[in-house]
Amino acid sequence: MVVGVLRLQVYFPASRSLKDKRQGVRRICDRVRHKFNVAVAEVGGLDTWQRSSLGVVVVGNENSHVQSMLDKIAAFIEQLYVGQILEQEQELLHYGEDEALNPGAPHGIPDLDGRGV
């Protein structure tokens, strides 16, 4: 399993209050959820009225697919013209199917209590 994490710093130049910014954040989050069926939330800059940090998570089974989705999501947000992306950070995390987690456990499920699965 591959988990892709996208963190964006978004600037809202037309925002004159927290209410304005939150409307922009809500619009971005709703549109991204609807189009891509991914998890997205405001994760930083909650009390600033022109900047926000957004987090997006994509889960898949191939690096190339997850990377492609993250790129498409960032481009889609930029094309909404609600806010300007100032910074973008991506990370791919790999889980499961790794015998290093627990060599005796099926499908890489960790043995947390020492008694087996």
Image (spheres, rainbow, N blue to C red):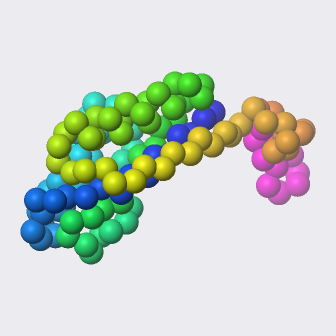
Picture coordinates of residue 72, whole percent (x, y) = 37, 31
User: Which residue is rendered at x = 47% and y = 27% of the image?
Assistant: 68
Quarter of the image with the N terminus is top right
Compared with residue 108, is residue 27 higher up or lower down, i.e. above or below?
Answer: below
Picture coordinates of residue 79, whole percent (x, y) = 22, 36
On whether residue 25 falls in the magenta region, the answer is no
User: Which residue is rendered at x = 25% and y = 50% of the image?
Assistant: 84
Picture coordinates of residue 65, whole percent (x, y) = 52, 25
Residue 109 lies left or right of residue 1; in this view the side is right
Picture coordinates of residue 30, whole percent (x, y) = 23, 43
Which stretch is magenta? 108-116
- Quarter of the image holding residue 74? top left
User: Which residue is rendered at x = 88% and y = 54% of the image?
Assistant: 114
* Residue 116 in view (yes/no): yes
* Residue 54 in view (yes/no): no
The overriding secondary structure of the stretch rendered in magenta is loop
User: Which residue is rendered at x = 25% and y = 72% of the image?
Assistant: 48
Compared with residue 32, is residue 49 higher up or lower down, i.e. above or below?
Answer: below
Residue 72 lies left or right of residue 80; in this view the side is right
**Number of marks:** 0
Residue 83 lies left or right of residue 10; in this view the side is left
The one nearer the camera, 95 or 70, is 70
Quarter of the image with the C terminus is top right
- Quarter of the image holding residue 94? top right
